[in-house]
């Protein structure tokens, strides 16, 4: 097979890129070693920035987000014994939408299928070749066991944080920035009604907790835990007792129900510069990961491929590889703002292992400054709802 762009990874980044390229008349083939149902079963974050929603609706991927998603005009911060509200809409004119990443994936996969796109789930042994040349290729074993080769003009690695594509780049050609965090999140899905109309980011001396939502009957919650925490050591009653204690310190009470999914999510910050090597470009988690606080990961991946579709179109039209350098130049500004935003939200709300009462008081003072000042809360609201596109 021959195509213009070979894409590794059929998550939201790879599928959205394929979709945006098709709208510009550019062909692509997308491969993923995971099956479609495997991706659908992975629980990810649930908040979409205003521009992410616009990208989904304006390009015809999903109007379901508007019907089944929930528009949130703001969010709650619970700390220092009280509940505070930040109204994004009032501060910035923008809002966010609660619409799980899994649903974004389903909408994209359906849209690509309806368009007759070449998207191959469940393939194996995916490798990339001649990535510095003018005719790189993808090789893989198809679901029927046959060996395949896809020749293309450009390759895109949208293959997640463990990216095979990124590992193919010689170390001396890229710089990697990393930050480890000494804690993780214990994430649950439960069958319960909503505890509040919007999300609650909860600071407490026992550590962070986040009360998010999925539907009227299923909720998503997280609490800060040790990276080596064992999920089996947490039966439902222990989970609820820990969550209720943390939010109860701020006067919040949760509505409980059976826990239907639980997992420990480790996290770190990671950025690769530049996001290109030869004829291969990286997008989404393959190029950068952010800690989950603030739900920037998916939004950043969508912002990447919006820029990338533009740059690839230019490069193909002009037959000029130098144009590809503009991708990193344009995308990295948002990547680093998102790194800072996610780091800031994380450091303001989590308890560090060696922290003392001084640190807790200092964090509460910072949170008070944020909610108590229109300038400071506007700064937070701009980051949360998403900065303008570059
Ligand atoms: C969710 C996850 C986040 O990291 C966040 O900041 C907000 C919401 C979620 O899964 O719903």
Image (cartoon, grey):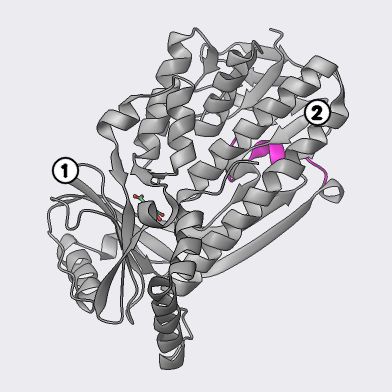
Disc 1 residue crowd, few under 14, some 14–19, many 20+, Cα 10 Å: few
* Magenta-colored span: 158-170
Residue where numbered disc 1 is placed? 216
- Residue contact between numbered discs 2 and 1, judged by CB atoms under 8 Å: no
Out of 117 and 62, give the one closest to the viewer: 62
Q: CA distance from mark 2 to mark 1?
A: 46 Å
For image coordinates 72% across by 42% down, the residue present is 330
Placement of the N terminus among the 4 image quadrants? top right
Residue 298: x, y in percent? 49, 42
Residue 215: x, y in percent? 21, 41
Q: Secondary structure at mark 2?
A: loop
Query: Is 165 located above or below residue 113 in the figure?
Result: below
Q: Is residue 55 left or right of residue 47?
A: right
Residue 296 colored magenta? no
- Occupied quadrant, residue 217: top left
Residue 182, can we see it?
yes
Number of numbered callouts drawn? 2
Residue 39: x, y in percent? 42, 32
Residue 35, can we see it?
no
Q: Earlier in the sequence, mark 2 or mark 1?
A: 1
Residue where numbered disc 2 is placed? 279
| Residue 343 tag number | none
Query: Is 153 located above or below residue 95 in the figure?
Result: above
Query: Is 173 located above or below residue 122 in the figure?
Result: below
Q: Secondary structure at mark 1?
A: loop
Out of 225 and 306, give the one closest to the viewer: 306
Prevailing secondary structure of the magenta residues: loop
Q: Is residue 237 left or right of residue 107?
A: left
Residue 98: x, y in percent? 33, 43
Out of 39 and 21, give the one closest to the viewer: 21
- Occupied quadrant, residue 211: bottom left
């Amino acid at each position: 097979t021959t195509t213009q762009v070979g894409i590794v990874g059929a998550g939201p980044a790879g599928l959205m890129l394929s979709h945006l390229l098709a709208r510009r008349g550019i062909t692509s083939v997308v491969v993923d070693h995971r099956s479609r149902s495997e991706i659908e079963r992975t629980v990810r974050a649930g908040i979409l920035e205003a521009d992410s929603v616009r990208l989904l609706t304006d390009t015809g991927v999903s109007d379901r987000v508007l019907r089944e998603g929930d528009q949130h005009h703001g969010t709650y911060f619970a700390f220092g014994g009280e509940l505070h509200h930040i109204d994004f809409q009032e501060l910035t004119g923008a809002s966010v939408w609660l619409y799980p990443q899994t649903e974004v994936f389903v909408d994209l996969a359906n849209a690509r299928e309806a368009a007759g796109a070449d998207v191959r789930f469940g393939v194996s042994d995916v490798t990339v070749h001649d990535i510095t040349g003018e005719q790189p290729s993808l090789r893989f074993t198809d679901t029927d066991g046959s060996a395949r080769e896809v020749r293309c003009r450009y390759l895109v690695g949208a293959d997640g944080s463990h990216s095979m594509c990124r590992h193919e780049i010689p170390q001396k050609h890229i710089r990697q920035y990393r930050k480890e965090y000494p804690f993780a999140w214990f994430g649950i899905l439960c069958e319960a009604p909503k505890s509040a109309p919007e999300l609650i980011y909860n600071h407490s001396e026992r550590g962070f907790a986040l009360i998010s939502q999925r539907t009227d009957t299923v909720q998503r919650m997280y609490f800060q835990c040790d990276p080596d925490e064992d999920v089996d050591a947490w039966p439902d009653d222990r989970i609820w007792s820990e969550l209720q204690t943390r939010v109860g310190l701020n006067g919040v009470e949760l509505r409980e129900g059976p826990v239907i999914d639980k997992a420990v999510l480790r996290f770190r910050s990671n950025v690769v510069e530049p996001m290109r090597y030869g004829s291969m470009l990286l997008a989404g988690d393959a190029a950068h990961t952010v800690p989950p606080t603030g739900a920037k990961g998916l939004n950043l991946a969508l912002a990447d491929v919006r820029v990338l579709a533009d740059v690839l179109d230019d490069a193909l039209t002009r037959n000029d590889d130098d144009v590809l350098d503009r991708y990193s130049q344009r995308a990295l500004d948002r990547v680093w703002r998102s790194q800072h935003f996610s780091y800031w939200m994380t450091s303001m709300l989590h308890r560090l292992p060696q922290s003392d009462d001084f640190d807790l008081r200092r964090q509460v003072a910072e949170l008070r400054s944020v909610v108590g000042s229109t300038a400071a809360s506007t700064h937070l609201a701009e980051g949360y709802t998403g900065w303008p596109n570059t």
